[in-house]
Amino acid sequence: MTAPNIILATLNARYIHASLGLRYLLANLDKHGGAGLRAQAVLREYTINRAPADVVADLLATLSATPALGLPSAPVPQAAKCQVVGLGVYIWNVSQTLQVIRLLKAARPEVKVVLGGPEVSHEVDQQAICQLADFVITGWGDVSFAKLCRALLDGPPPLMKIIPGEQPALTQLALPYDEYSDADLAHRLLYVEASRGCPFKCEFCLSALDKTAWGFELDRVLAALEGLYQRGARSFKFVDRTFNLKIEHSVRILQFFLDKLPQPLHPSHRPEQADTVGAACQISPAAASKADLFLHFEVIPDHLPDRLKAQLALFPSGVLQLEVGVQTFNVTVQQTVSRRQDNAATEANLRWLLAHTHAHLHVDLIFGLPGETLHSFADGFDRLLAIAPHEIQLGILKRLRGSPITRHTAPHGIVYDTQPPYSVQQTGVVDAATVTRFARFARYWDLLANSGRFSRTLALWLGSAPATELGPTQPATDPCATARPSPFWRFWAFSDWLWQHLGATHKLTPEVLVDALFDYLSEPSQQPFTLSAHAVRQALLADYTASGARASPKALQGALPRPTPPEAKAAHTLATRQARHLSV
């Protein structure tokens, strides 16, 4: 085996993620670097949990075309004029990648290390990782990386270390989808795109720097998707920042996938017919299991024309997942960060999607935006919870290098962590202790609500419980201690209690959470109103048995049915988390 002259590598968050960016670089090596360059390159993907020494050992073994036996003394191939290691750097892997480069350079200082990605495209002179690298490509790397590799291998080498990425017309880019292996198709989530860029200017996002959005030629995209589908791909995650920006393209892409659904999943009538709006397919669970597609799109919340609604309504359960970035309902905060959003249309569209489609909705809120207080965030959370999306994903504002949000740092007293992912530590209206409490709140919300494991219990507790189930109340000025605090403040008080009792936010089993919920919700001294122990136990029992858990929480001992042997898993099932939400 001949040692490659080019390795393209990155550290993904999880194995299931497959780097779209690296595959673009591979696909464009010959097109923009000259024939024969792709044949000299290999792809290596790792995860952020892998030890840096192990990553470097594998890189050195690949560079020398020998089995990876350890870090030291990998021989330098005599035939190679130069060897290049290109690394994709992002906010979540920069710390681990820095360690990899230090070890790699110590073992093989002559290897040319090239960095690219959003984390190293801005503030280059302030980053230790950029100082260690030989070259840094800022911005788009599809063309520039290929040209740099050709120059390094055949000369003359570039004089500048920092290379501004060249942004070509999208027609000049080779699509990367042939670079997905059969193993990728079988075991990983495939990232695809129909457009790049974003016309909106939300200052917390790097896409605010884009002048507009650019669309690929749709026929090329659909042909590539067809190729992936014919090879067996069934899971597609579109990374377009604004999938529903150009409706003509959106409906064609959706129609492409609708045509892949087996009969009788796909109604014979087409979505152009007006009577399809608001009429979601009625499909039996057995038939739905045949719809082995999974599609993920990020959509603008206040832009759902009837043509798009008509098609969304045709997909069966378990196929569509929509990520909807609401971020904040606070109009003043929206204006501060240059976010254009019609809150009334957003709310109406979310309600429509829940009522008339089978789409699984992930709706995002960001805590720590300039000017957003805990109380105003709580109001927005309660407003969103009243709509009842399947998941409310809670994030803390992060300072992405290069994003315009930095202009608010001093005026709004924002302090960011100096280490990745540069999360907000405090603002002028939210102190550090509150940010820490919110981080725990978000983690517990994900475990209890977004997991789908406690749907009935949360509905009893945070919804409109019958008056007969409520215990005594006591007036107070603290929002957490009012006679009937809002859902946010109820969960906020529970989050504080849970931390005090468990002292942990991770490695919490369903059984630990069942017992904690029972103790908290049925104990009068824990909160200003209580639920009857019987009502709480019955809700927890229903949730626990529906989740498929098979242990025995203390709170449910004597109430659980006799365990039965687990059923064999079907060849294709709905995503577990989605299935829990759909079962309620």
Image: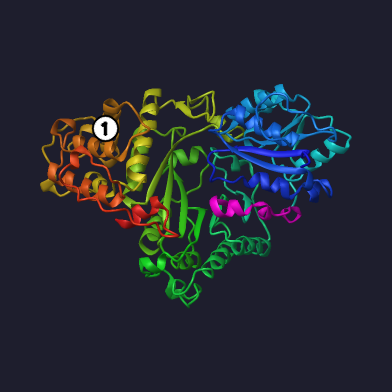
Residue that carries the numbered disc 1 in the rendered image: 493
Expressed as whole percent of the image width and height from the top left, the position of residue 520 reads: 20, 35
Expressed as whole percent of the image width and height from the top left, the position of residue 394 reads: 41, 40
Quadrant (top left/top right/bottom left/bottom right) for the C terminus: bottom left
Expressed as whole percent of the image width and height from the top left, the position of residue 47 reads: 56, 37
Residue 311 to residue 450: above or below:
below
255, 176: nearer the viewer: 176
Which span is picked out in magenta?
A: 170-191
Give the residue displayed 59% in from the left and 51% down from the top: 184
Q: Is residue 354 magenta?
A: no
Give the residue displayed 73% in from the left and 28% down from the top: 74
316, 442: nearer the viewer: 316
Q: Viewed as shown, does residue 435 lie left or right of 484? A: right
Q: Extreme bottom residue here?
A: 268
Expressed as whole percent of the image width and height from the top left, the position of residue 533 reads: 13, 41
Q: Viewed as shown, does residue 153 lie left or right of 498? A: right
> For the residue labelled by badge 1, is the local secondary structure a helix, a strand or a loop?
helix
Residue 111 to residue 218: above or below:
above
* Residue 489 appears in view: no
Q: Viewed as shown, does residue 322 lie left or right of 464? A: right
Report crowding for label 1: few under 14, some 14 to 19, many 20 or more residues within 10 A (C-alpha).
Answer: some
Quadrant (top left/top right/bottom left/bottom right) for the N terminus: top right
Residue 269 to residue 488: above or below:
below
- Tell me which corner region of the image, top left, top right, bottom left or bottom right, holds residue 392: top left
- Tell me which corner region of the image, top left, top right, bottom left or bottom right, holds residue 102: top right
* Residue 233 appears in view: yes
Q: What's under tag 1, amino acid-wise?
A: Ala
Give the residue displayed 76% in from the left and 45% down from the top: 143
Q: Viewed as shown, does residue 286 lie left or right of 145? A: left
Give the residue displayed 15% in from the left and 34% down from the top: 523
